[in-house]
Amino acid sequence: MTNPPLNPDDPNGQQPPSPYDQYAGAQDPYSQNPYPQDPYQQGPYQQNPYGAAGPAGGRPRPSVTFQQAIELFFKNYAVFNGRASRSEYWWVALFTFLVNAVLNGLARSIGDSGSMALTVVSSLWSLAILVPSLAICWRRLHDTGRPGGWFFIVLIPIVGWIILIVFLAGPSRQDAWQRFDNGTLPVES
């Protein structure tokens, strides 16, 4: 048994033309990408913000090891533009905490005779890391999609520090590069 033709009036069995045939070759406007380019392919100024060796801008900051984080901390001494990854920030926080703990522990164990010298060393250390600590905190806030000025929330007693820690521990925002990767950017290696 054979199927009857689709159009009994047409001897070839072809379907009559549809009023929608005019759209047959047209592209569906809803299937097009609304963004003309992938934002992770190039930086906002058509340049590679992380140096010639790496891929174009807009990509997340790389996860780093403890040693790499310390090196980047001092290489990007006063760079407040750009972003810092979560690992980059928290390895540095651990490093500065450990150095402060060792200096304070030594000052207590030595007693009065050597504690003055260690107090001076500890004070010099704190002054030496003040600017890079602020810079990496600023860049970490940028990576979470917030302006660096959110750092000043620490001026609110107790609650401000808690809010800042939550912000700093937050995930990276994929679109943060569009707002914060301008000016002198931090180096990656």
Image (cartoon, helix red, strand yellow):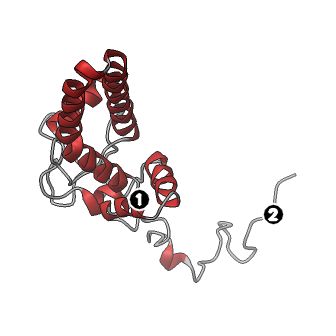
Element marked by disc 2: loop
Residue 115, given in percent of the width and then of the height, sits at 26, 24
109 or 97, which lies in front?
109
Task: Residue at 12%, 52% (x, y): give it.
Answer: 184
Kind of residue sitting beneath label 1 = Val
Q: Quadrant of the C terminus?
A: top left
Q: Which residue is mark 1?
A: 154
- Categorize mark 1 by other alpha carbons within 10 Å: few (<14), some (14-19), many (20+): some
- Specify which label sits upstream in the sequence, 1 or 2: 2
Q: Nearer the viewer, mark 1 or mark 2?
A: 1
Task: Residue at 33%, 56% (x, y): give it.
Answer: 142
Task: Residue at 36%, 54% (x, y): give it.
Answer: 141
Residue lying farthest to the bottom in this orientation? 19
Q: Quadrant of residue 16?
A: bottom right
113 or 53, which lies in front?
113
Residue lying farthest to the right in this orientation? 1
Q: Which residue is mark 2?
A: 4
- Categorize mark 2 by other alpha carbons within 10 Å: few (<14), some (14-19), many (20+): few
Kind of residue sitting beneath label 2 = Pro
Residue lying farthest to the top in this orientation? 110
Q: Is the residue under label 2 in contact with that under label 1 (CB below 8 Å)?
A: no
Left or right: residue 8 versus residue 124 is: right
Disc marking residue 53:
none
Residue 136 in view in this figure: yes
Report how far apart the C-alphas of labels 1 and 2 lie in the structure: 80 Å
